[in-house]
Amino acid sequence: MANLIVTSALLVESAEKLASIRQEFDHTDDHAGADPSIWGQSALESAMEQFAGDWGIHRAKISTAVGELHTKLEDMTAGWNDTEQKLSDSLTTEKV
């Protein structure tokens, strides 16, 4: 079994990816009605618009959850960095 290796860089990268995911959820509506003619039939176009509207409710809930997870990950990163610094400081000895 492999050991779990956590680094500050990995935590920062994870937080950045979560922020990117949340941004995608928040701006999906920007693309929803960009070119309705791609659907061809008006009934299909209407169904897709309705789906996009309905999905907006779920997307908002997911976006909120991802945002909360992002905040927790940023807090964890700060705590990790603080703990890592304290451990490093405790191992440093001054030569007299």
Image (cartoon, rainbow, N blue to C red):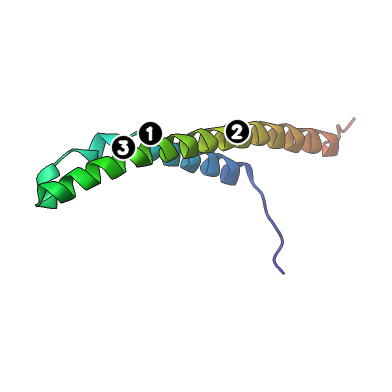
Q: Quadrant of residue 79?
A: top right
Measuring 68% from the left and 35% from the top, which residue is drawn there? 81
Of residues 29 and 82, the one drawn nearer to the viewer in this rendering:
29
Where disc 3 sits, the SS reads: helix
Element carrying mark 1? helix
Q: Nearer the viewer, residue 66 or 7?
A: 66
Q: Are marks 3 and 1 in contact (CB under 8 Å)?
A: no
The label shown at residue 63 is: none
Q: Residue at x 51, y 33 (%)?
A: 64
> Where residue 15 sits in the image (x, y, percent)?
53, 39
Q: Which residue is mark 1?
A: 26
**Badge 2 density bin: few <14, some 14–19, many ≥20, Cα 10 Å:** some
Identify the amino acid type marked 1: Asp
In the rendering, which numbered label is found on residue 74?
A: 2
Name of the residue lying farthest toward the bottom: 1
43 lies left or right of 95: left
Q: Secondary structure at mark 2?
A: helix
* Quarter that holds the C terminus: top right
Q: Distance from label 3 to label 1 (Cα)?
A: 13 Å
Mark 1 packing: few (<14 Cα in 10 Å), some, or many (20+)? Answer: some
Looking at the image, is 36 positioned above or below residue 79? Answer: below
Q: Which mark is residue 53?
A: 3
**Callout in the foreground (2, 3):** 3
Front residue of 25 and 9: 25
- Could you tell me the amino acid type at mark 3? Gly
Spatial CA distance of label 2 from label 1 is 20 Å
Q: CA distance from mark 2 to mark 3?
A: 31 Å
Q: What quarter of the picture does the N terminus occupy?
A: bottom right
Dot 2 or dot 1: first in sequence order is 1
Residue 73 position within the rendered picture, expressed as x and y whole percent measured from the top left: 61, 37
